[in-house]
Image (cartoon, rainbow, N blue to C red):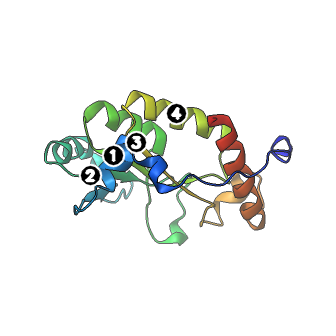
Amino acid sequence: MNTMASISTPAGASSPAFGAHPGYRRMFAPDQLTLGIFLPLRFYQGDMQALAGQADLVADIDRHGFAAVWVRDVPLFDPAFGDAGQVFDAFTYLAFLAARTQRVALATGSAIFSLRHPIDLAKASATIDQLSGGRLVLGVASGDRPAEFPAYGIEHAERGARFAQSVAYFRALLR
């Protein structure tokens, strides 16, 4: 990611800047308790049937006024980590769920910026946000599963610097 080294780190937007964003407004409605769910609802243990019907449940929670559905960006299964995480690709799954819902915010908890290229992150994020009517809420992280980094040819110790560079590049791309 040497091409990102020359991009300065802009300051983040203030909360009023998000006031017009449909997904943000849905999750952080003033003076209201909002509820969301985190997927997967059932842990994958080698049988995809455990995940069957989740999209139908998400469509139901959308109709019942839930604020958000969250998915985790877990690139690789690490049995030593203690959970199955998200089996589906977070962005592909959110796009699928966007097509099945009308109002619920679609949130990542969190996209691993240090393992993904900022161009791909920006395109996937902007696509889902546009196609869903502005319902994407993008949580970001540097990655907490050390086993994933060698698979990408990245040193775990470099994740902080990579994260900062990726966020700056991502912001520049979206401008």
Distance (Cα) linking label 2 and label 3: 13 Å
Return the disc, 2 or 1, that comes first in the chain's sequence.
2
Mark 1 lies on residue:
105
Return the disc, 1 or 3, that comes first in the chain's sequence.
3
Give the label, 1 or 3, closer to the camera: 3
Q: Quadrant of the rendered structure where residue 169 is? A: top right
Q: Which amino acid does label 2 sit on?
A: Ala
**Closer to us: 167 or 71:** 167
Q: Would you say residue 41 is visible in this rendering?
A: no
Q: Measured from the top left, where is residue 34 in percent x and y?
A: 24, 59
Q: Which amino acid does label 3 sit on?
A: His
Residue shown at 21%/52% (left/top)? 66
Tell me whether the residue at label 2 lies in contact with that at label 1, contact meaning CB atoms closer than 8 angstroms.
Answer: yes
Return the disc, 4 or 3, that comes first in the chain's sequence.
3
Q: Would you say residue 12 is visible in this rendering?
A: yes
Mark 4 is surrounded, within 10 Å at the Cα level, by few (under 14), some (14 to 19) or many (20 or more) other residues, namely some
SS for callout 2: loop
Mark 3 is surrounded, within 10 Å at the Cα level, by few (under 14), some (14 to 19) or many (20 or more) other residues, namely some
Return the disc, 2 or 3, that comes first in the chain's sequence.
3
SS for callout 1: strand
Q: What residue type is labelled 1?
A: Ala
Mark 2 lies on residue:
67
User: From the image, which quarter does the N terminus lie in?
Assistant: top right
Distance (Cα) linking label 4 and label 3: 13 Å
